[in-house]
Image (cartoon, coloured by chain):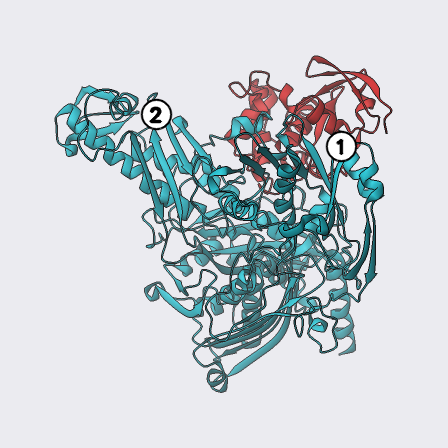
Chain colours: A red, B cyan
């Protein structure tokens, strides 16, 4: 396995060039080659969703992709949501904080990266829609209820125009 | 005091770093020159190791070392017995603890046999494939009942049988009570509690600094101090040469306390031997068979009652599967034995169990820690008794609740903390009443259920009660210190795995010192910051560490008052604290910042009075005489589809009493999470071994953790009965949610399917299993 490939990936707006083995997982690349350890690895078989990142704006499981597949693409990780964190957070992160939407915090980056594009597509989701949206992310601590509350709160924060906040 | 934080729903101090991906978890530790480990694990449940060929692995490029048991020399020792058996008369306990690497025999699938250390994890895993282990298979002991048959293969050949323990505990005289009873009910129950499946797997990184002769280990443990002490002893180091850090931990729930795992023994040893940092991170598949389980018990239980439904006595005999080794002693079955008694005044009790070695992963506590099993048996007995006696299920519970004037209530048996099981305080009926009111019990059974049944819907309601022994000793400690910039440092020895300690403990300190809760820097789980303590388990953090922190903060408050009274030349009683300052009451101009006062407490010139200690700092310890007993009632409405045997939770209500509450927001989260795990245990999760001891459910595709679609919104209310055993009046809350859910599912499903006359005597259920039970009931009905 000595074959190496040089790849260029834009992560959180910054260009990274690394020489890697073709078998290197995208999750390991982000965490161990780029030191972006906010992306967590929970199962490495695509079920738990903890490693979710945005790949050209869409949520993917970084444990089910190879780093070389990201060559020439844009990846956003949790670190990219709020560049001035922890002092300044993304509204979704703020909402998770206020609603106690996390306990151990290990699965949280995956939830956030699943929910950011979800809220862009559906700015005013119902509880049921939120639960469906996060059904591919496992959390063992919260029982999901405060996560659902956090998403409702975030929807309100991100769309301060009351006409977009009609209750459902 | 300007602000009172105790009892407030305040958001957590630790969240911004967690939310922004900037928190340090164990796998986030990167050190220069670090090596990576992968293990060869047994594919056989039971067998003799004939040979291990590691030559090809050693020759692979990038492999630095390969170790088997033979390479460990004198370092190879069975692990320590972590929890000795409690002092119960006539107890039999055979301690057989796990080994770092299997030597002659393997005793469960997943037991480590060889360890590869390489330049990357990828290379280490390649090298694992190069290693050939020849194992002569032996018949696997899988079934608990068969394990004790005379011709069963022996897992530990130096023992006469696979018996790990035999314990009898009694209160009063059950046989006499039975002779006087109007009704005696006897049933067999099966309860299987699964695995913790914390989202973060286990892992550790060890770094030996040869120049300073100092070992640092980051470890996903719930008990860093115990690990530090043990490592120092094993490695021949002083405890001051070893620092164990439990950084942010991605969920614990019990199994992460099971020190010492083989990997915890091996990783620091390899780091010292190779003089390079060494990392091992468990993968999810390993987590299923290398991290401890909780699993199953079979109970043969009997309850004797008067015709009015008053309990005269309970007799319970059970088998407990302890897996291949039993380093954690008898905590789980003792909890089952004790928690079975529940909220009820049981005058006579006979309880006997046998713990059994099997060729399966070790069993140690997982959230609830055997309490589920006991609660299930008792609640089921009461449901069956109520049916037989024609009583309402709530009425039979009401008639047997320990009345509030009977506390402290002595159950006369020994609990897991080695002292008699005495409930400190409780008030059970209000919790039941509140739960019934909240879920609208009367209205549901009188109006809604008949209406929905008429529409052809199978809806049912369940209501169950439970107690939880929490907050056990021996002790925890804490140090509180005010810095010259006015920040407050607090350190305690327990680790934290998401329980919100950085906030709830800060609330306790903030109230004592009159400082902003956000100005408190809390450190948990770093032996360099605080090095006495026990660990995070048994719902004890808020009780034991919380009260130690409270005591340390109160001592610092006294130091502030003493020094300020000298500086301001007034009596201590005339001083007030708030906003990080101290001043003479009514004279705000006299205010001194606590930071300034801290500087004065550490003079650089001049003399201090004899006996003066520097700094505004104090260390204190707290050890309760025994645990505090929390309790609660859960109620649930379900709709069952008898065709598909799926269960939909329509409403879920819980009323919980854990004494005084530090932060209700955090408490709600703990309850929600516990219930979610309880729902998983009751209906979705199941550990399945085949007859050869192979684990068939070793992925999240086979072992089903509930998602947001399976866990309903949970409605919570509280009763507050403070514990008299500690100054804060707190009781633990970590495990409560998970305890009664199995019993609740059984009752609610039976009610929903009343026409089939089901009697559910097992957990977990699943759509498949429930479908079978429905078919059996239909056949019985048809045949009758």
Residue at 77% across, 37% down: B124
Mark 2 and mark 1: Cα distance apart in space: 44 Å
Pick whichever, B657 or B703, lies toward us: B703
Residue sitting farthest toward the bottom: B179
Callout in the foreground (2, 1): 2
Label total for image? 2
Label number found at residue A26: none
For label 1, count other residues whose C-alpha is less than 10 Å away and answer few (under 14), some (14-19) or many (20+): many
Q: Position of residue B408 (x, y in %)?
A: 34, 63
User: Which quadrant holds residue A74?
Assistant: top right
Q: Position of residue B636 (x, y in %)?
A: 57, 54
Assign a secondary structure to mark 1. helix
For mark 1, name the chain: A
Residue at 51% across, 19% down: A87
Give above or below for B47 relative to B684. below
Q: Position of residue B337 (x, y in %)?
A: 52, 67
Task: Determine whether, in the image, residue B513 is placed left or right of residue B366.
Answer: left
Residue behind mark 2: B483
Residues under numbered marks 2 and 1 in contact, where contact means CB atoms less than 8 Å apart: no
Task: Determine whether, in the image, residue B119 is placed left or right of residue B610.
Answer: right
Give above or below for B271 relative to B597. below
State whether residue A136 appears in this view: no
Task: Determine whether, in the image, residue B352 is placed left or right of residue B413.
Answer: right
State whether residue B79 appears in this view: yes
Residue behind mark 1: A63
Residue at 68% across, 55% down: B683
């Amino acid at each position: 396995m000595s074959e190496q490939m040089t790849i260029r990936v834009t992560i959180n707006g910054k260009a990274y060039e690394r020489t890697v083995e073709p078998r290197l997982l995208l999750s390991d690349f982000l965490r161990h080659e780029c030191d972006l350890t906010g992306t967590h690895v929970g199962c490495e078989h695509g079920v738990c969703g903890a490693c979710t990142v945005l790949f050209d704006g869409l949520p993917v499981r970084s444990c089910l992709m190879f780093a070389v597949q990201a060559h020439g693409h844009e990846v956003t990780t949790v670190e990219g949501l709020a560049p001035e964190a922890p002092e300044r957070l993304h509204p979704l992160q703020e909402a998770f904080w206020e609603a106690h939407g996390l306990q151990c915090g290990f699965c949280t980056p995956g939830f956030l990266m699943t929910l950011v594009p979800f809220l862009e597509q559906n700015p005013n989701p119902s509880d049921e829609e939120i639960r469906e949206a996060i059904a591919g992310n496992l959390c063992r601590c919260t029982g999901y209820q405060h996560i659902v509350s956090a998403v409702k709160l975030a929807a309100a924060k991100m769309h301060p125009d009351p006409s977009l906040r009609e209750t459902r | 005091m300007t602000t009172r934080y105790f009892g407030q729903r305040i958001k957590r101090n630790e969240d911004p770093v967690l939310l922004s991906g900037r928190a340090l978890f164990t796998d986030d530790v990167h050190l220069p020159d670090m090596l990576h480990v992968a293990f060869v694990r047994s594919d056989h449940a039971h067998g003799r190791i004939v040979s291990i060929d590691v030559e090809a692995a050693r020759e692979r490029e990038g492999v630095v070392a390969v170790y088997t048991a033979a390479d460990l020399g004198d370092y190879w020792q069975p692990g320590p017995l972590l929890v000795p058996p409690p002092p119960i008369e006539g107890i039999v306990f055979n301690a057989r603890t796990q080994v770092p690497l299997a030597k002659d025999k393997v005793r469960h699938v997943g037991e480590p046999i060889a360890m590869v250390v390489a330049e990357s994890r990828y290379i280490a895993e390649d090298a694992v494939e190069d290693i050939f282990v020849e194992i002569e298979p032996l018949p696997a002991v899988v079934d608990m009942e068969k394990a004790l048959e005379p011709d069963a293969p022996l897992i530990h050949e130096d023992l006469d049988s696979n018996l790990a323990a035999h314990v009898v505990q009694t209160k009063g005289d059950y046989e006499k009570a039975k002779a006087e009873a109007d009704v005696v009910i006897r049933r067999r129950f099966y309860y299987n509690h699964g695995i913790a499946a914390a989202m973060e797997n286990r892992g550790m990184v060890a770094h030996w600094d040869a120049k300073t002769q100092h070992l640092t280990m980051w470890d996903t443990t719930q008990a860093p101090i115990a690990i530090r002490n043990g490592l120092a002893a094993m490695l021949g180091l002083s405890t001051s040469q070893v620092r164990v850090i439990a950084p942010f931990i991605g969920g614990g729930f019990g199994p992460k306390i099971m020190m010492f795992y083989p990997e915890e023994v091996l990783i620091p040893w390899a780091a010292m031997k190779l003089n390079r940092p060494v990392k091992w991170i468990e993968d999810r598949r390993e987590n299923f068979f290398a991290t401890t389980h909780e699993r199953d018990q079979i109970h043969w239980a009997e309850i004797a009652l008067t015709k009015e439904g008053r309990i005269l006595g309970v007799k319970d005999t059970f088998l407990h599967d302890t897996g291949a080794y039993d380093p954690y002693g008898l905590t789980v079955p003792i909890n089952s034995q004790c928690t079975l008694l529940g909220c009820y005044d049981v005058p006579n009790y006979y309880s006997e169990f046998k713990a059994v070695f099997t060729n399966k992963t070790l069993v140690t506590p997982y959230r609830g820690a055997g309490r589920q099993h006991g609660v299930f048996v008792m609640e089921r007995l009461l449901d069956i008794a109520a049916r037989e006696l024609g009583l309402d299920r709530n009425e039979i519970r009401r008639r047997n609740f320990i009345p509030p004037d009977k506390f402290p209530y002595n159950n006369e048996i020994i609990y897991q903390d080695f002292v008699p099981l005495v409930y400190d305080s409780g008030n059970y009926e209000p919790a039941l009443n509140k739960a019934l009111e909240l879920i609208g019990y009367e209205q549901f059974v009188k109006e809604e259920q008949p209406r929905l049944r008429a529409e052809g819907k199978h809806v049912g309601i369940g209501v169950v009660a439970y107690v939880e022994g929490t907050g056990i000793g021996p002790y925890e400690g804490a140090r509180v210190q005010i810095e010259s910039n006015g920040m407050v440092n607090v350190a305690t020895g327990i680790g934290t795995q998401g329980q919100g300690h950085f906030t709830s403990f800060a609330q306790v300190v903030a109230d004592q010192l009159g400082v902003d809760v956000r100005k408190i820097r809390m450190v948990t789980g770093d032996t360099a910051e605080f090095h006495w303590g026990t660990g995070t388990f048994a719902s004890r953090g808020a009780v034991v560490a919380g009260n130690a922190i409270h005591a340390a903060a109160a001592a610092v408050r006294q130091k502030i008052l003493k020094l300020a009274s000298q500086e301001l030349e007034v009596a201590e009683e005339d001083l007030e604290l708030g906003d990080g300052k101290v001043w003479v009451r009514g004279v705000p101009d006299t205010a001194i910042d606590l930071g300034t006062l801290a500087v004065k407490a550490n003079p650089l010139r001049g003399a201090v009075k004899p006996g003066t200690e520097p700094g505004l700092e104090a260390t204190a310890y707290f050890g309760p005489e025994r645990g505090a007993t929390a309790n609660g009632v859960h109620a649930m409405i379900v709709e069952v589809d008898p065709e598909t045997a799926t269960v939909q939770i329509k409403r879920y209500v819980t009323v919980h009493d854990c004494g005084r509450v530090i932060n209700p927001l955090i408490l709600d989260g703990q309850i929600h999470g516990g219930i979610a795990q309880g729902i998983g245990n009751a209906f979705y999760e199941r550990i399945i071994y085949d007859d050869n001891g192979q684990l068939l459910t070793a992925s999240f595709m086979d072992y089903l953790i509930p998602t947001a679609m399976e866990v309903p919104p949970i409605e919570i209310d509280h009763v507050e009965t403070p514990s008299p055993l500690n100054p804060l009046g707190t009781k633990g809350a970590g495990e409560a949610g998970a305890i009664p859910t199995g019993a609740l599912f059984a009752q609610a499903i039976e009610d929903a399917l009343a026409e089939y006359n089901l009697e559910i005597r097992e957990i977990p259920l699943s759509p498949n299993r429930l479908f079978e039970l429905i078919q059996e009931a239909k056949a019985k009905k048809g045949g009758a």
